[in-house]
Amino acid sequence: DAGITQSPRHKVTETGTPVTLRCHQTENHRYMYWYRQDPGHGLRLIHYSYGVKDTDKGEVSDGYSVSRSKTEDFLLTLESATSSQTSVYFCAIGMAGGSTDTQYFGPGTRLTVL
Amino acid sequence: GNSVTQMEGPVTLSEEAFLTINCTYTATGYPSLFWYVQYPGEGLQLLLKATKADDKGSNKGFEATYRKETTSFHLEKGSVQVSDSAVYFCALSDPSGGSYIPTFGRGTSLIVHP
């Protein structure tokens, strides 16, 4: 199994509070991704990173920011959580390039915003 | 742009039945194609992949053939088990434009009854 951990695994918070989710990898993969998964929407890309300090937006980036100061860590921050951000969040990593385009996913973080 | 369309679920089968989950795609370049599986409470994991036309990916009794002429990558299994109950995602990776952002289908839920 690819070495990807997410923390916390579960979190309940209140509307308006900041929340940071952490993704940690031990595979030295260049690409890291944050997705959210909601019923009826499948997986939606929030942000991704293609190197240390190199990040870009995905299709649902509003209300989220990310940082990557080390190859192994990719943080997702909800600046001011809203109930619409209640979801399951998955981190993924990938090497990129040809047949190595496989993504490896973390176990997920279930976030509830009350 | 790129897109992946897969059949909506849930697909409900009896144990030992034959399974087909349809997947078609559009891509601007020459993509790699993937099937991922998500078991309850877990992240996605790679089930199989194919990187060029007429390649067949296979794993755990599942198979899918890369059909460029019909832009399809249908997932099949000859005899499903209760343990195959999960959500299956078809995906493509098309780095021809310099992007390593995969495109996922919305997922198809499979329920297998004893």
Image: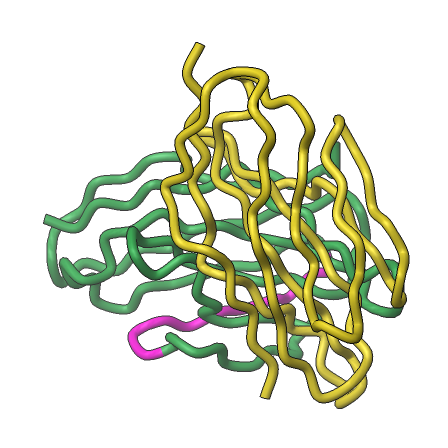
Chain colours: A green, B yellow
Is B10 situated above or below B1? above
Q: Is residue B111 left or right of residue B92?
A: left
Residue A71 in percent (x, y) is at: 73, 60
Residue at left offset 32%, top offset 54%: A38
In magenta segment, residue A30:
no
Is B44 situated above or below A67? above
Q: Is residue A83 left or right of residue A99?
A: left
Residue at left offset 49%, top offset 77%: A58
Residue A76 in percent (x, y) is at: 45, 61
Residue B4 in percent (x, y) is at: 56, 69
Q: Residue furthest top?
A: B114
Residue B24 in percent (x, y) is at: 60, 67
For the N terminus of chain B, the image quarter is bottom right
Residue at left offset 36%, top offset 71%: A64
Tell me the quarter of the picture where residue B54 sits: bottom right
Q: Is residue A70 left or right of residue B44?
A: right
Residue at left offset 44%, top offset 59%: B106
Q: Main secondary structure of the magenta part?
A: strand
Which span of residues is magenta-colored?
A62-71
Q: Is residue A12 left or right of residue B46?
A: left
Q: Nearer the viewer, residue B12 or A69?
A: B12
For the C terminus of chain B, the image quarter is top left
Is B45 situated above or below A31? above
Q: Nearer the viewer, residue A94 or A27?
A: A94
In magenta segment, residue A65:
yes
